Image (cartoon, rainbow, N blue to C red):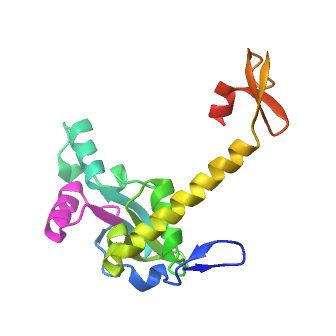
Amino acid sequence: MIWTKNKKMRTGIKVGDIMTRNFVFVSPDTNLKECSKKMVKSKVGCLIVKDGQKLKGVLTRREILWAIIKKSKKDLESILAKDVMKKKVVTIKPSADIIEAMNKFKKKKVRRLPVVEFGKVIGVITLKDILKMDPGLFEMIYEMIQIKEETEKMRKMDTVVVRRNGICDECGDYALLLKEDEMWICDSCYHER
């Protein structure tokens, strides 16, 4: 583990070093029947949807199941990948450290990240890729992320001062107030932030 000047933890292992380069993909105009067949044949739960080299979206089993349930009157051959795919996709650069990938997995609650460079999708990295490389690394990184989150929580708690009952500066309710950012706010407003 390496700590940078701006106190970011790094392993020195780049996403591009361990990503899957031979990922399974379809075009936006591929119908869901073909997408399903491709998933089964390739034994994957996710397809990258790309037009040429440009990432257009991600199609998982969940989107296909949703289409089957919600569009039950339609045939899977008449529904296209572009109709049900996730269009807002979290991506990562090949030059990023795997810790950045781990942070994105955790914060965005995703299990795979398309790797994009110069607007082109060049690979996919998954938690499995990281675990295959070094199973012990996962535990260490996870612990470091937990420590960082706990430190942030404690830092927030240090800035909070409990005060007697009063009027909340944010909602106007009479309640027990906490001081944050030079404002006296009630517990409800504090937790909405």
Q: Residue at x 81, y 40 (%)?
A: 181
Quadrant containing the N terminus is: bottom right
Residue 104: in magenta span: no
Query: Quick one: which residue is furthest to the right in this view?
Result: 182
Query: Quick one: which residue is furthest to the top in this view?
Result: 174
Q: Is residue 52 above or below residue 84?
A: below
Relative to residue 77, is residue 138 drawn left or right? Answer: right
**Residue 10 percent across, percent down from the top left:** 56, 77
Quadrant containing the C terminus is: top right
- Image quadrant where residue 133 sits: bottom left
Relative to residue 62, is residue 18 drawn left or right? Answer: right
The image shows a total of numbered marks equal to 0
Q: Which residues are magenta?
A: 28-48
Q: Is residue 139 above or below residue 185?
A: below
Q: Is residue 51 visible?
A: no
Q: Residue at x 75, y 38 (%)?
A: 160
Q: Residue at x 39, y 82 (%)?
A: 18
**Residue 81 percent across, percent down from the top left:** 31, 56
Q: Is residue 117 above or below residue 110?
A: below
Q: Residue at x 68, y 32 (%)?
A: 190
Q: Is residue 29 visible?
A: yes
**Residue 191 percent across, percent down from the top left:** 63, 33
Residue 35: in magenta span: yes
Relative to residue 21, is residue 103 drawn left or right? Answer: right
Q: Nearer the viewer, residue 165 or 110?
A: 165
Q: Nearer the viewer, residue 78 or 118?
A: 118
**Residue 80 percent across, percent down from the top left:** 29, 54
- Image quadrant where residue 159 sits: top right
